[in-house]
Image (cartoon, helix red, strand yellow):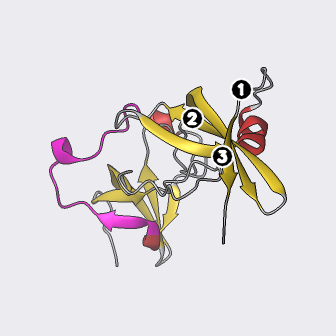
Amino acid sequence: MEFQVKDKVMLKVLPWKGVVHFGKWGKLNPRYVGPFKVLEEIGKVAYKLELPEELSRVHNTFHVSNLKKCHADEPLAVSLDGLHFDDKLHFVEEPVEIIDSEVKWLKQSRIPLVKVRWNSKRGPEFTWEREDHFRKKYHISSQRPQYRQVSRLKP
């Protein structure tokens, strides 16, 4: 696929939060954001884009596989307001609170889980996360929640 200078393109984003989820894949997250104007063609497979200030930490040159021609009017495009990305174009959603906790048993292993409410633009979003991974990623060292015991998982 080729684009011309001044074409409008949509940029693919990666909808991962970077934590372990049990069956959570973010199917409703936007796959592309934009549109952005093509500033320059770099070889045959890369393009330099005009990015807004919100994406200033992101390098502005992208492979053609991460772009798609924008055929819609700008008012119909996904806005960047309220969406947060890291420098690798991963969505950044922060936890709001831990609302529940429980312990799952897998053979002889005890796995503490916490139910987390996230600050999602789409409304309330809740996921079960492994407590150790969650506390390490978000540097939370507050007191431990009260756990509900859950029966052992049977194969």
Observer-nearest residue: 120 or 44? 120
Reading the image, the residue beneath label 1 is: 145
Label 2: which secondary element: strand
Residue 116, quarter of picture:
top right
Mark-to-mark CA distance, 1 and 2: 12 Å
Q: Is 82 included in the stretch rendered in magenta?
A: yes
Please identify, in this view, whether the residue under mark 1 or under mark 2 is nearer the observer. Answer: 1
Residue 36 at x, y percent in the picture = 34, 50
Q: Is mark 3 on a helix, strand or loop?
A: strand
Give the mark, 1 or 3, whose residue is nearer the N terminus: 1
Q: Label 1's element?
A: loop
> Which of the marked residues, 1 or 2, is nearer the chain's N terminus?
2
Q: Which one is earlier in the sequence, the residue at label 3 or at label 2?
A: 2
- Residues at circles 1 and 2 in contact by the CB criterion of under 8 Å: no
Q: Which amino acid does label 2 sit on?
A: Val
Residue located beneath label 2 in the image:
116
Q: Which amino acid does label 1 sit on?
A: Pro
Q: Position of residue 139 (x, y in %)?
A: 77, 30
Mark 3 — residue?
150
